[in-house]
Image (cartoon, coloured by chain):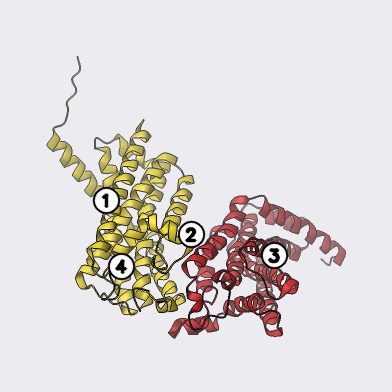
Chain colours: A red, B yellow
Amino acid sequence: MRRRPAETARHLVALSRRSTLAIFRQPALVGPSLIFPLFFAALGSSAFSRAISLPGFPQVDSYLQFTLAGTVTQGVLFGSVTGAAALATDIQDGFFDRLLAAPASRTAILFGRLAGSSLFGAMQALVFLLVLLPFGVVVQAGLLGYVSIVVAGFLTAFAVGALMSVVALKTGSAEAVQGTFPVLFILLFLSSAFFPRETMSGVYRRIADANPISYMVEGQRWLTIDGVSLTAMLQTLAIPAGIAVLTTALALRQLSARLRAR
Amino acid sequence: MTTTVQPSTDALISSTQRTIGILAKRSIRNIRRLPSAFFPALAMPIFNMIVFAGTFFAVTKIPGFPTDRSINWYMPLGIMMGAAFGGVGLGFTAIRDIETGFYDRLRMTPTSRLSLVLGPLTGTLVRIVMMTTIVIVLGVALGARFTGGVLGVLCLYIAALGLATIGAGWGLGLAFRFQDMRGAAVMQLSIFLVMFLSSAQVPLNVMTGWLHTVARVNPATNILRLARVGLVDVGNPDHLSWNAVWGGLVAIGVMAGLTLTFAVRSLHRLND
């Protein structure tokens, strides 16, 4: 059934609004993905304050300034699981089937969910920037840097949310989506989110070199430490955008497979 | 007229020992029956050891760091995290047993309440020995070196078993108080905070600011110090030193005593 773009957009807005409100109505889901990254940032600022003078560390005022990008990425990665878990819950409790029975746009069902977690990702990035600002963490790239990091939060949440939606659509199980959480955790730690790649060695260094999260984080880090540069902007925005295109294609394919299987 | 026959002290001790043995065996048997429950408890310390040692590889170059091998510092951390969470995991099992009614059946048996705590605790300690052994073997394969020899290994086992006992007492106490999964969140969060607000990531002489103030009075710092006495450099003041050992032993003794008392008292309250 072909729908007019305006109709699809209306469905998308309604479902996006629903998913966004659903996230903010559950402080138990929102709280940990805001508190834990800030806790780790505070912990690192005390534990690794003397590490910033080690060879391989960039010139930074404090470990907090170095770890800002890691904090944003950590929070957004963990928070983006909630949207996909909610999609799986919709499948489990039959709401997904009721939407399919209604004349609702199929893609709006998916993008509506992703919009909620993406907006939450952008909000997380903004909160982290504002909370760390009084502690002397200033983004050298200025307003463009702040905006880029918030947009990167949106794009990263969209990309990871779409990837997690593949699991949600394939299994229809919120537990299965939550079960993929350790994979994100491992990917984050096997990157330069908390320490520069230049200080690592061996296999671990090679993994961090191959991990796209390293480059995403480093883009935001250069905006924070050095200011605006084309490379930093590309790494901050193009990498999550590229991953988002890829994971969205996978999610749409999985949605089609689920629809065909009905 | 009815008369109540009181069991003799010997019979009571024998019954308690038998119950401890049965409950410990049940806990150990679950490793084979429910490997999915044991696997994360084993994977977490291995993961922690590898990623911390890899990510923070360079911290050993900070002047005053007690070892030049990051794996020597983070292998004990992985084991201690595994032991602490393995200990509180007993609380999760207790909550499940309460919810399924298994605990009600246990409480109707003519056995001492102490055995309902010591039985599962024994099983948990066996699991911790297994986990510690596996992580040590893997750690050594990845480059960890026990500068303190057998004594160093022994200190690491004592610290792991001690921390697991503290975690188990805390987990069981909370399980008996809450009697549902609300207790699980409190267990995990409290252990997480206690472990990270210590010398988990770097030694006291390397950290600065608020964390130093908190870690200095956190008993987990002393237990971690005990765990690492056989892994720091030979020239370090902590290397197999009684000064580094006694604080850990006292922390284990006091904290285990307090948390196990909390568990037994909470169990009695559950009976009321």
Chain letter of disc 3 in the image: A
Residue B165, how many percent across, how many down? 30, 52
Label 1, label 4: how far apart the Cα atoms are: 18 Å
Mark nearer the N terminus (1 vs 2): 2
Q: Quadrant of the C terminus of chain A?
A: bottom right
Check disc 4 and give the amino acid type. Answer: Arg
Mark nearer the N terminus (2 vs 4): 2
Residue A92, how many percent across, how many down? 61, 55
Whether B84 is drawn above or below B133: the answer is above
Label 3 crowd bin: few (<14), some (14–19), many (20+), radius 10 Å: many
Q: Nearer the viewer, residue B264 or B196?
A: B196
Residue B253's disc number: 1
Labels 2 and 4 positioned on one and the same chain: yes
Mark nearer the N terminus (1 vs 4): 4
Check disc 1 and give the amino acid type. Answer: Gly
Residue A182, how many percent across, how many down? 50, 66
